[in-house]
Image: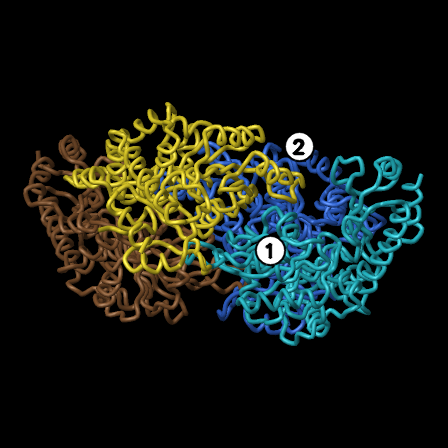
Chain colours: A cyan, B blue, C yellow, D brown
Amino acid sequence: MNLNFASDNTGPAAEPVMRAVIEANAGAAMPYGAEPAMTRVRDALRAAFAWPEAEVLLVATGTGANALALSGLVEPWETVFCHRIAHIEEDECGAPEFYTGGAKLTLVEGADGKMTPETLAAAMAPVGTKGVHGVQRGALSVTNVTEAGTVYTLDEMAALTAMAREAGMPCHLDGARFANACAALGCSAADLASGFDVVSFGGTKNGCLAAEAIVMRDGTRAAEMAFRRKRAAQLWSKHRYLSAQMEAYLADDLWLANAHAANAACARLAEGLRALGAEMVWEPQANMIFCRMDRAAHDRALAEAQYYLMDEAERPLCRLVCDFTKTDAEVDRLLELLRG
Amino acid sequence: MNLNFASDNTGPAAEPVMRAVIEANAGAAMPYGAEPAMTRVRDALRAAFAWPEAEVLLVATGTGANALALSGLVEPWETVFCHRIAHIEEDECGAPEFYTGGAKLTLVEGADGKMTPETLAAAMAPVGTKGVHGVQRGALSVTNVTEAGTVYTLDEMAALTAMAREAGMPCHLDGARFANACAALGCSAADLASGFDVVSFGGTKNGCLAAEAIVMRDGTRAAEMAFRRKRAAQLWSKHRYLSAQMEAYLADDLWLANAHAANAACARLAEGLRALGAEMVWEPQANMIFCRMDRAAHDRALAEAQYYLMDEAERPLCRLVCDFTKTDAEVDRLLELLRG
Amino acid sequence: MNLNFASDNTGPAAEPVMRAVIEANAGAAMPYGAEPAMTRVRDALRAAFAWPEAEVLLVATGTGANALALSGLVEPWETVFCHRIAHIEEDECGAPEFYTGGAKLTLVEGADGKMTPETLAAAMAPVGTKGVHGVQRGALSVTNVTEAGTVYTLDEMAALTAMAREAGMPCHLDGARFANACAALGCSAADLASGFDVVSFGGTKNGCLAAEAIVMRDGTRAAEMAFRRKRAAQLWSKHRYLSAQMEAYLADDLWLANAHAANAACARLAEGLRALGAEMVWEPQANMIFCRMDRAAHDRALAEAQYYLMDEAERPLCRLVCDFTKTDAEVDRLLELLRG
Amino acid sequence: MNLNFASDNTGPAAEPVMRAVIEANAGAAMPYGAEPAMTRVRDALRAAFAWPEAEVLLVATGTGANALALSGLVEPWETVFCHRIAHIEEDECGAPEFYTGGAKLTLVEGADGKMTPETLAAAMAPVGTKGVHGVQRGALSVTNVTEAGTVYTLDEMAALTAMAREAGMPCHLDGARFANACAALGCSAADLASGFDVVSFGGTKNGCLAAEAIVMRDGTRAAEMAFRRKRAAQLWSKHRYLSAQMEAYLADDLWLANAHAANAACARLAEGLRALGAEMVWEPQANMIFCRMDRAAHDRALAEAQYYLMDEAERPLCRLVCDFTKTDAEVDRLLELLRG
């Protein structure tokens, strides 16, 4: 029984994705994205996002997708507005700074891992008021699902992207958990992407081995981005294995089905945890739970299961993540362990 | 019939590698290289290279392996000595410059894609003679198999690395075709790596989907390199799919067997080409052929087969590469097409 | 009458400094710091700082001094802790990020433009807890005089640098107004520099034309820093004009006398402003005043004088800075204008 | 007697330049280029270059002018074509690579320190033929006076810039010795600048303390360049001392008069050296001489004079440079010493 709730990246690849990789392995294929599957992937994403001019680059890591995407949006003397706990700020070891040639990130506050029009306005206010002495407004980057496991509504995102656009800034969506956000909101990919210029569309956490798509609504910078990808050493020679993953992930809405499964497992787990007296730190709205409960319960569970304790408190903060493979039986077994 | 001779990256993954990826897909695994297979990969490379203290990082692209390796060897105000047609100079779109923070490459001349002690000395002579005004000697990077399809002998490499070491420079081996070089020389991995500090040990061109190992003889900079890899967005979350590939590639000397197969196919092809009157531009010593023959022959062959013509001459320069899957029948069919 | 209170960089160079530049103009001199005056400057700073092994680099801008200093202290995957309103954060257009290859700045809160042990601890706490995923603790940068015109006491600085040192971080002092801080505290240069590894010792704002010294307590990285300076295009060929300025600035404690003059003018001005009903936003402890008073007063004054209004409030925030040349008559005339 | 022939940067500032600096020191002045003299400098350069839309940035070093200029012309994945012995390649410690974010320099051969259409074509041919794998054609950078002391004719420059323009590349002129080139060619500034997009117009070597102008024919990127200058820490706060120098340098064609003086001294020296049996390595066409003569002569001269021996040969290569202050008496004294 798989009791690994440490992250959605501890899960396997989905069976259709793996099968597609195996099928892609037959015979020879031209390299670097010249394989026919890549055209199909681009077309599938154009259709899903309702962006008929979109261009798509595939890379193997979410950090790569984010850092490359941002490098095409901001100049080195500009700044990216993002939430204080955004992945690009906390979990990428400075990759955005590296890829952009040293642009800044300006941290925006906000409860539940979410920026608000008020907190974004507060962060934007002083930026760009100092002429050449200060960095300039560069781009907005929104993460949905947030790193707190909460989900921006479509209206909440629209309010933020409208502000950015009014200020002349393009908008980036860190969609490492794009699918889980769509599943949570009951919306389409096009709905979620609306208002953004570039999306990091995640596959790895939700059924791929290692595949993320950078989807650019407007293809005008596609040529530049192709140079950036190669120069960043993110261009695969045997690119067919990337496009095969993404094609299978998109086919028959596998991405969405997987996300529904992950979110449902998470909801079941959250309900059970509440029944055990856990306090939710943030409302779990997708596939991640941050809660506090007694250490004794963790001691029992962690003898058999895997997840992270994030502090040393008596009732430590724990993070529990469900990937798309989690079964009711696995969730229930974890709850049983915690219950003692 | 697979008549794609465009590159060794047009070939598939080897069956044992693919099987290992499928097996790695069972259940959960801790991410980022914490899976047990990674320890086995490190130990296998330590043994193969006879470097008991070696540390290993896996990445998905050869450019990533080279650029990361060099970034740990040189300061931004230093230069890397490499052959004029080295992959790091011609085929990486400036990735070494990007990863090193703007270090230079100093180009070394030499027939057959190979530096010599004389040409290296000539390139080194002026570097470092101008105090703070000029860049400093940083590292030597040798490519074996060379980009010309020739192979440095062990003595030839030893002469170059000795010169570098005497000048206080560490040595990097671009081993994108490491296996083909070993097969050509009949030497061990340890023999080929001898004299180097860091090796880019290629898997992708010779049986992997996308897997390259950065092997560092001396592990002292391993911690720094781990930060560099993450920051460069080259760290996989589902890292098990990298280590599975590399483990299978190393097991039972699959890497060497594949390379022998590729080199043998290439030798058969070269012999056939010579019989057809082709002039070899460089002596094919591994799995790549650069030759000239009549355009009419190419016109016939390219209707069915795939490879590159590199100029518009009457007898155009063509590049033919054999990956490890090429059969005698495929080689013979290509020759038949060329013969007309 | 000179009623320019916009900044201390609107003031002229001090007469002894200008005379030294004129004298340095006689005949030929070897370039790039090989002139004898540079040795005397180094020795004078060694003595003043009581750092017998110190090495010194001169540059023309404060931003250059800060960015170069930091580039020698932190790796690209590290972060510099500084106050939210530090010059390196707000007024250098990302130069620290550029020079360091993309290191981060982590912003520390604190009233009166000053970090405290508590706010520094809060900022440091999460940094370095995420393995390779997060940036690492790199350096502490303290600005004294602060950008709020307040002055850290020696004890306050010692508390901060001790924390940094315990965490393994080197300490940088942004001393663009080093002299004004010494004058305010009545301490020596050695007192102010105590606890730091590298100091940006400012000359430009306090009597030089364009001259700042990077003073490194421990000379071990001096060779590296010399390459960094040249590569950053901060190395003057006719370097004698930099060393002449700095030598004259240090001679006979001109730096300190000038700062005393500037601070005294500022104190006189602050007293007068208070009598006119101005509210001090921060306590003016050196040569800068941030206060609020009625717009009508400003309308009168700004017809004749120059300084900055920083918002559009009814009682706008204004910044008034005294350079070392400000006379009692000039201060009194400004007060008279404001009084109406 | 000033027998320093080591470089033109060992000379002093010209008297009118120094006087202008002294005059600029009166009273207060708004910082960062807002002083009225900067407008006059811009207008003077617009007139001199016959570029009515030109924008101008002043910096303190020639390396800064070149590196900043290039950073506005090329992307990080592009390359700058320049002569193998260009200052940007040999004498700037990688500053162009730093400022451009890691662009390459592609070295062009050519006798006498000069590129030719043939050598430039040869260097350009392979660049840009490899799709995303290779760096792209970025810009052409011509140095006149060359580092060999020779001078491109106007026709020679026009041939090169026409080739660049046809290939879609902007053109940069490294004019650290712009004035000496004009003096040598008997042409106007507008003549020399014709065909270029950005010129590094040098002042430091020819009468300024430290002042170089980046002159951009087309001002469209001026805003971007202003950010780049600040971010590179090249923006002076007391900017008046830069504009004062440049204004005086331009007034009454001081720049040209100084260059004529330097070139004339050099011609006298060259004639004398030839009479002593020196072999000119390159034809001295401006203010620099590279020649070989007996070591015994050098031993005598170097006891009293200063210049560089650049190798250890029996007849060592020596470099002798005349700045604008060199008198006939000084030149004759050096010749006397060499004659023995």
Residue B299 image position (x, y, % from top left)? 59, 73
Give the residue displayed 41% in from the left and 31% down from the top.
C216
Q: Is residue D143 visible?
A: no
- Tell me the CA gap for discs 1 and 2: 37 Å
**Chain of the residue where label 2 is placed in the rendered structure:** B
Give the residue displayed 76% in from the left and 62% down from the top.
A179
Residue closest to the eye, A335 or C243: A335
Point out the image quarter for the C terminus of chain C. bottom left
Classify residue A225 as left or right of residue A270. left
Across the whole image, how many numbered discs are drawn on residues? 2
Do marks 1 and 2 share a subunit? no
Residue closest to the eye, A84 or D189: A84
Q: Looking at the picture, which amino acid does disc 2 mark?
A: Ala
**Chain of the residue where label 1 is placed in the rendered structure:** A
Q: Is residue C70 above or below residue D154?
A: above
Residue that mark 1 sits on: A67
Residue closest to the eye, A32 or B85: A32
Instruction: Specify few, some or many for label 1: CA neighbours under 10 Å numbering under 14, 14-19, or 20 or more.
Output: many
Q: Quadrant of residue C148?
A: top left
Residue that mark 2 sits on: B50
Q: Is residue A248 above or below residue D229?
A: below
Judged from the image, the secondary structure of the residue bearing numbered disc 1 is helix
Residue D129 image position (x, y, % from top left)? 50, 65
